[in-house]
Amino acid sequence: MLKVTLIRSKIGSTPKQRQVLAALGLRRMHQEKEIQDNASMRGMIAKVRHMLKVVE
């Protein structure tokens, strides 16, 4: 399991980045979610890496 935290605002991001954040279940700043560690989740994290903090 990976713990991801949204550390930067969605304001100013592209629509695709906002869709990725929604798919990860992150809606608010400093919100944390635990997600499964698999290839599809890692790909989504890579798309918005600059907005997240990831703890393994």
Image: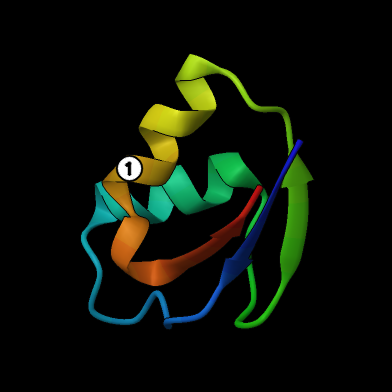
Left or right of 3? Residue 46 is left
**Is 12 or 24 nearer to us in this picture?**
24
**Residue 13, above or below 54:** below
- Residue beneath disc 1: 46
Where disc 1 sits, the SS reads helix
Instruction: Give percent across and percent down for residue 13.
Output: 25, 69
Left or right of 48? Residue 9 is right
Three-letter amino acid code at the position of disc 1:
Ala
**Is 51 or 12 nearer to us in this picture?**
51
Instruction: Give percent across and percent down for residue 53.
Output: 52, 67
Indicate the quadrant where residue 9 lies: bottom left
Instruction: Give percent across and percent down for residue 55.
Output: 64, 57
Residue at left 39%, top 56%?
A: 18
Residue at left 40%, top 74%?
A: 10
Q: How is the image coloured?
A: rainbow
Indicate the quadrant where residue 26 lies: bottom right
**Residue 31, above or below 1:** below
- Outermost residue to the front: 56
Q: Tag 1: Cα neighbours inside 10 Å, few (<14), some, or many (≥20)?
A: few
**Residue 4, above or below 44:** below
Left or right of 36? Residue 47 is left
Residue at left 72%, top 73%?
A: 31
- Outermost residue to the top: 39
Screen quadrant of the N terminus: top right
**Is 54 or 29 nearer to us in this picture?**
54
Instruction: Give percent across and percent down for residue 52.
Output: 47, 65
